[in-house]
């Protein structure tokens, strides 16, 4: 059974600053769920390409405590936490964009820490917590997604997971709630909707007990 630690954020202590960042679509820095400290990034490089405009950032590079590094075809990468794998480096839970200075919203990516490299793919991206809005008129966006995301031992089984309590608006305007879980199976991650849906109150108790962390949400717009 792997040990874990909750690493408090060293920044954004002021509530007003956090609120302002959320309003601007900037992700506040959360605490982290850690199962393998040697695979925690101590630095994330955002290399410049010397190309003008939207191409002026290359794939980001994560540099770990153990001296290893990982190149990911992702941009504006932030580290959220880890999920353990038996006898392997953990799965990193990252926040990032699939391109630089573009319309793709910030999303969540599970990435093996010991991968040779990681290439962006829409199928491997998950909603970042908060809200996502869209619509033909950017001055009056319509929210179609709302969700909260938790990482750690957040459910009854005490397995390390990522879990989303979310709602999506369908074509009739009705909000459809769901709970989505991402967990490790062997060397890879698998996801699925939980039915019956667990109560969020149990997850909030796990947060209070220090076994689970919530990733602060932001408001984003999809174009």
Image (cartoon, rainbow, N blue to C red):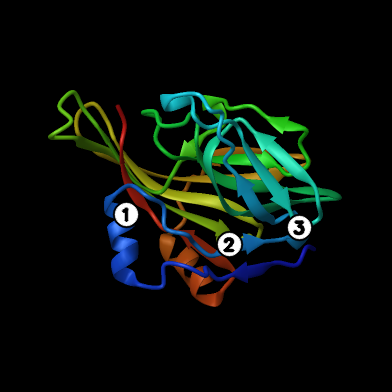
Asked whether, in this view, residue 126 is left or right of residue 183, the answer is left
Viewer-nearest of labels 3 and 2? Answer: 3
Location of residue 198 in the rendering, given as x and y in whole percent from the top left corner: 47, 55
Residue at the image position 28 percent from the left and 68 percent from the top: 16
Precedes in sequence: disc 3 or disc 2: 2
Q: Could you say which disc has been placed on residue 32 in the image?
A: 2
Give the spatial CA distance, label 3 vs label 1. 30 Å
Residue at the image position 44 percent from the left and 24 percent from the top: 52
> How many numbered marks have been drawn onto this rendered protein structure?
3
- Quadrant where the N terminus lies? bottom right
Helix, strand or loop under label 1: helix
148 and 65: which is toward the camera = 65
149 and 109: which is toward the camera = 109
129 and 115: which is toward the camera = 115
58 and 80: which is toward the camera = 58
Asked whether, in this view, residue 82 is left or right of residue 76, the answer is right
Precedes in sequence: disc 2 or disc 1: 1
Residue at the image position 82 percent from the left and 50 percent from the top: 86
Q: Please, is residue 29 above or below residue 13 in the view?
A: above
Helix, strand or loop under label 3: loop
Label 3: few (<14), some or many (≥20) within 10 Å?
few
Location of residue 71 in the rendering, given as x and y in whole percent from the top left corner: 69, 36
Asked whether, in this view, residue 49 is left or right of residue 52, the answer is right
Q: Which residue is mark 3?
A: 65
């Amino acid at each position: 059974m792997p040990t874990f630690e909750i690493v408090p954020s060293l920044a954004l202590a002021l509530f007003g600053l956090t609120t302002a960042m959320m309003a601007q679509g900037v992700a506040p820095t959360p605490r982290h769920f850690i199962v393998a400290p040697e695979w925690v990034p101590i630095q994330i490089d955002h290399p410049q390409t010397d190309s003008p405009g939207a191409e002026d950032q290359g794939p980001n590079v994560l540099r770990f405590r153990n001296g290893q590094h990982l190149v990911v075809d992702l941009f504006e990468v932030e580290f959220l936490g880890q999920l353990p794998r038996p006898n392997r480096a953990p799965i990193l839970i990252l926040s990032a964009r699939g391109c630089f200075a573009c319309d793709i919203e910030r999303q969540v990516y599970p990435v093996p820490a010991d991968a040779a490299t990681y290439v962006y793919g829409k199928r491997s991206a998950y909603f970042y917590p908060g809200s996502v809005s869209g619509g033909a008129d950017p001055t009056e966006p319509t929210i179609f997604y709302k969700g909260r995301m938790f990482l750690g031992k957040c459910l009854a089984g005490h397995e390390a997971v990522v879990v989303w309590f979310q709602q999506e608006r369908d074509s009739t305007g009705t909000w459809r709630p769901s709970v989505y879980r991402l967990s490790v199976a062997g060397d890879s991650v698998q996801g699925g909707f939980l039915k019956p849906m667990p109560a969020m109150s149990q997850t909030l108790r796990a947060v209070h007990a220090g076994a689970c962390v919530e990733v602060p949400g932001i408001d984003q717009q999809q174009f």
